[in-house]
Image (cartoon, grey):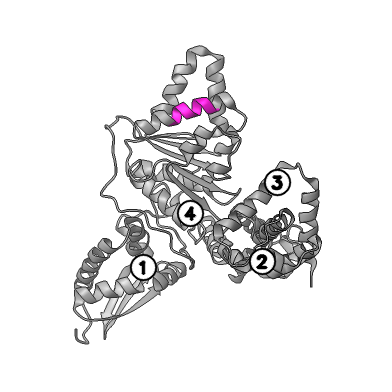
């Protein structure tokens, strides 16, 4: 290969050929999300330098794509090279100049500003060969419903807990009703399911303005149905409104519970769209089989497509979320490590994470101070109790739960399935998820090598019981154990 430097034209040619190879070896969504964000800077003395827009992209590429990129480069060059990935603002500029979405065009499909930080790789979506289009329609793009302009893919930070859900959502936006239909996204409150479903709407209409897309909450669907039933002359108009869409986005389907007539109409709407080859995307706070208050035939329909969940973000993803918020809001942060501190303290959900940073910035502005860690601690002192200052571990949870139930820790980790042990085990799993940084697979390992799905089942069972409010003793017990663990020294 020699030791000489290459000209810009030669470098561009080498990189374009390398990208062609990578495109055949990677899922389309992954290729667009990561490879298209790279800019070749130089090739000299056996070193090929690639620029990316930020540290998270660099770390993800270093961990996941170094080998396929280096192999593709070696194929093109006929010799092995040492790949170097650096952060350089020119990568962001080049991406915008090439026609990729920028921060000034949020409705377009944009790569995320942060990347997954480890964790198992979900199965990638299949590659596609274009966007499915129906008959061309005249007039302006048809996005019906109130889409939040902030809820776009460019502002959705991807991490291990939402990686697969984000990939499926992008695939649906690119090619509706092609590979994934229906799509059912479930997550706890504040973890981004509404953001993701609305991002599909923004991106799909940007990719294909001929589509008719409708976004509604279940409450709105119910209100429209009640109004139509009240005035019989409007029922056909209601059916046309919901059944003549290319993409129907339904948020918070769990609120169909106990609305029997609305469930029947939704069932027929679902069937009409599905049989017509239209895309359906649904969100809920529980997976289909846990929606016991809905008709079995509805739950069956929801589960017949792709069911994806969004978990609670880990520490690295929470930091990335705050960095993205700083970028988009234009916040001035004097001490960057303050974001790490906030992310370590607010672990419940993304909504509260955003709120905490906004509160800190507002507090600093009102008091004429810079955003520092000390200012953040003062601003959040009323919502972050001192008991959050130390870390709770899974072992601490197991020990305290065992004491409250008069059991040995090994009972929680072992195979005993008596009712009292199983109940205690589920409470311990729930509190481990609530109070520690451990992922569900890690919690499973700490409970005798149990599967991740077993932990999810136990956690959601306790969540349902707490929400139902039928067992005040359970509520008191969970609060007591939580207080003891947070106050422990």
- Would you say the residues marked 3 and 2 are in contact, meaning their CB atoms lie under 8 Å apart? no
Specify which label sits upstream in the sequence, 1 or 4.
1
Q: Residues within 10 Å of mark 3 (few under 14, many from 20)?
A: some
Chief SS of the magenta region: helix
Q: Return the disc, 3 or 1, that comes first in the chain's sequence.
A: 1
Position in image of residue 325 (x %, y %): 54, 58
Point 55% across, 37% down: residue: 253
How far apart marks 3 and 2 lie (CA) works out to 22 Å
Residue located beneath label 1 in the image: 90
Q: Nearer the viewer, mark 3 or mark 1?
A: 3
Q: Which residue is mark 2?
A: 413
Image quarter (top left, top right, bottom left or bottom right) of the N terminus = bottom left
In front: label 2 or label 4: 2
**Nearer the N terminus, badge 1 or badge 2?**
1
For label 4, the residue is 155
**In this rendering, position of residue 274 left or right of residue 407:** left
- Report which residue position mark 3 lands on: 465
Q: In what element is the residue under mark 1?
A: helix
Q: Quadrant of residue 443?
A: bottom right
Q: Is residue 244 left or right of residue 396?
A: left
**Which is more foreground, mark 3 or mark 2?**
2
- Dot 2 alpha-carbon crowd within 10 angstroms: few under 14, some 14 to 19, many 20 or more: some
> What stretch of residues is rendered in magenta?
263-270
Magenta-drawn stretch contains 268 = yes
Specify whether 136 is left or right of 353. Answer: left
User: In this picture, is 402 found above or below 195?
Assistant: below
Label 4 environment density (alpha carbons within 10 Å; few <14, some 14–19, many ≥20):
many
């Amino acid at each position: 290969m020699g030791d000489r430097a290459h000209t810009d034209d030669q470098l561009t040619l080498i990189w374009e050929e390398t990208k062609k190879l990578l495109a055949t070896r990677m899922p389309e969504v992954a290729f667009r999300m990561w490879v298209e964000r790279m800019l070749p800077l130089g090739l000299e003395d056996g070193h090929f330098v690639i620029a990316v827009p930020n540290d998270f992209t660099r770390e993800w590429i270093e961990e996941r794509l170094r080998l396929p990129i280096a192999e593709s480069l070696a194929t093109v060059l006929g010799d092995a090279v040492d790949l170097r990935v650096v952060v350089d603002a020119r990568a962001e500029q080049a991406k915008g100049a090439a026609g990729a979405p920028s921060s000034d065009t949020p409705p377009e499909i944009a790569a995320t500003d942060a990347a997954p930080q480890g964790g198992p790789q979900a199965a990638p979506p299949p590659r596609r060969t274009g966007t499915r289009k129906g008959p061309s329609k005249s007039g302006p793009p048809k996005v019906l419903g109130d889409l939040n302009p902030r809820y776009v893919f460019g502002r959705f930070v991807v991490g291990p807990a939402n990686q697969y859900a984000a990939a499926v959502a992008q695939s649906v936006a690119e090619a509706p009703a092609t590979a994934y239909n229906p799509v059912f996204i479930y997550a706890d409150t504040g973890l981004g399911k509404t953001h993701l479903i609305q991002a599909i709407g923004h991106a799909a209409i940007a990719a294909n303005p001929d589509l008719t897309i409708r976004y509604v909450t279940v409450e709105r669907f119910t209100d429209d149905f009640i109004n139509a039933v009240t005035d019989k002359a409007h029922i056909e108009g209601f059916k046309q409104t919901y059944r003549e869409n290319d993409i129907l986005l339904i948020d918070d389907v769990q609120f169909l519970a106990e609305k029997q007539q609305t469930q029947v109409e939704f069932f027929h709407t679902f069937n009409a769209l599905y049989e017509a080859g239209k895309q359906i995307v649904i969100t809920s706070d529980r997976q289909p089989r846990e929606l016991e208050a809905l008709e079995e035939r509805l739950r069956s329909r929801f589960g017949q497509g792709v069911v994806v969940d969004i978990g609670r973000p880990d520490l690295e993803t929470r930091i990335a979320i705050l960095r993205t918020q700083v970028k988009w809001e234009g916040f001035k942060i004097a001490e960057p490590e303050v974001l790490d501190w906030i992310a370590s303290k607010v672990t419940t959900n993304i909504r509260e994470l955003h709120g905490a940073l906004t509160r800190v910035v507002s507090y600093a502005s009102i008091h004429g101070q810079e955003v520092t860690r000390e200012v953040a601690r003062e601003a959040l002192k009323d919502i972050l109790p001192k008991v959050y200052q130390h870390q709770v571990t899974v072992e601490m949870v197991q020990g305290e739960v065992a004491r409250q139930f008069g059991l040995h820790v090994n009972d929680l980790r072992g195979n005993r399935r008596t009712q009292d042990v199983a109940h205690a085990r589920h409470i311990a799993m729930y509190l481990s998820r609530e109070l520690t940084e451990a992922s569900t697979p890690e919690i499973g390992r700490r409970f005798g090598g149990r599967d991740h799905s077993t932990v999810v089942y136990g956690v959601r069972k306790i969540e349902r019981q707490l929400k139902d409010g039928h067992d005040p003793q359970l509520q008191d017990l969970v609060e007591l154990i939580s207080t003891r663990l947070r106050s422990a020294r």
